[in-house]
Each structure stands twice: as structure tokens, then as C-alpha cells.
Amino acid sequence: MKSFPELRPRWPDAVVAAAVVLLAAACAWFIWRGAEQGGALEAVVSVDGTEAFTTPLTGLTRVERTVQANGYTLKIILTDKEVWVEESDCPTQDCVHTGHISRSGQSIVCLPARVTVRLVGGTGEPDVDAVIG
């Protein structure tokens, strides 16, 4: 009478392992392919949740835009590669300290003025965010 089952791998085990590897590769390909967005990179500036203006970044050398909202003034700099808030008279200066943003999905927020600057579109290198664990 045998007390232990046979633990040698057999051909059905190899088929299951290959299927798992192929499924993982297909999922990774769809994620990376889907991360690429089409169109030109644009800066969208919103005040109180309402879009104030949209500026495509293609071909810009350096454009300064001033936004006045809720008693505060922000000086936004736009170039063909990045956007940042250079000056603001808000008390916390978080929007200035955020620094330069250059990839789709990044944003700058000024809470006292209720202004958001976010980048949308673009076909740059894809960024994949994932939580594994």
C-alpha cells in the first residue's frame, strides 16, 4: 500500500504551466498597448471644476498664461515638453512646489485658488501603474 502520491510532473502539468505563461504574456501586452494614448499632449486648466482653457503643447516654445481665480493669481508656463506653475500668491505654494509635469495623467493642483492643470493625450512612452502583492 502506497502512502504518498507520485510527485513527478506529467504532460498535463506542462500544458497548464504553458497556458498560465501565455495568459500572463497576453495580459501584459494588452496593458502596455492600452497605456499608449493617441493625439497631441495638451494642458487642460480648470477653475472650480470648469475647464478654463486647453492648450496643445506641440510646437510651443514658452507661453506664459495668467489665471486669476478665487482671489489668487497663478502664472502658468507651458512649453512643448512640460508645464509648471512659476508663481502663485496662494499661502501654501503647493502648486509651485509640485514642479514640472511632462507626461499624460500628471496634474498640478492649487487648492486655495481651486485651479487644476492636467496633461492629457500624447503618444510618449507608456507608463504602467500596478500594485503587486
Image: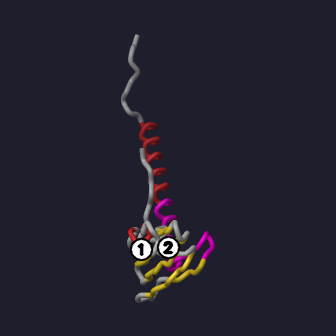
Which label is found at residue 75?
none
Going 45% across and 68% down the picture, which residue do you hit? 91
The residue at the far top in this view is: 1
Query: Picture coordinates of residue 26 (x, y %)?
Result: 48, 56
Query: Picture coordinates of residue 132 (x, y %)?
Result: 42, 47
Residue 39 covered by magenta stretch: yes
Residue contact at pointers 1 and 2, CB within 8 angstroms: yes
Question: Is 56 situated above or below 19?
Answer: below
Q: CA distance from mark 1 to mark 2?
A: 7 Å
Quadrant assignment, res 115? bottom right
In the picture, the quarter occupied by the N terminus is: top left
Going 45% across and 58% down the picture, which residue do you hit? 129
Going 38% across and 71% down the picture, which residue do you hit? 99
Q: Label 2, secondary structure: give it.
A: strand
Q: Residues within 10 Å of mark 1 (few under 14, many from 20)?
A: some
Q: Which residues are magenta?
A: 30-51
In the picture, the quarter occupied by the C terminus is: top left
Which label is found at residue 119?
2
Amino acid at the residue labelled 2: Leu
Can I make out residue 16 in this image?
yes
Task: Give the colouring mode of the picture.
Answer: secondary structure
Which label is found at residue 102?
1
Going 63% across and 73% down the picture, which residue do you hit? 50
Amino acid at the residue labelled 1: Ser
Q: Label 1, secondary structure: give it.
A: loop
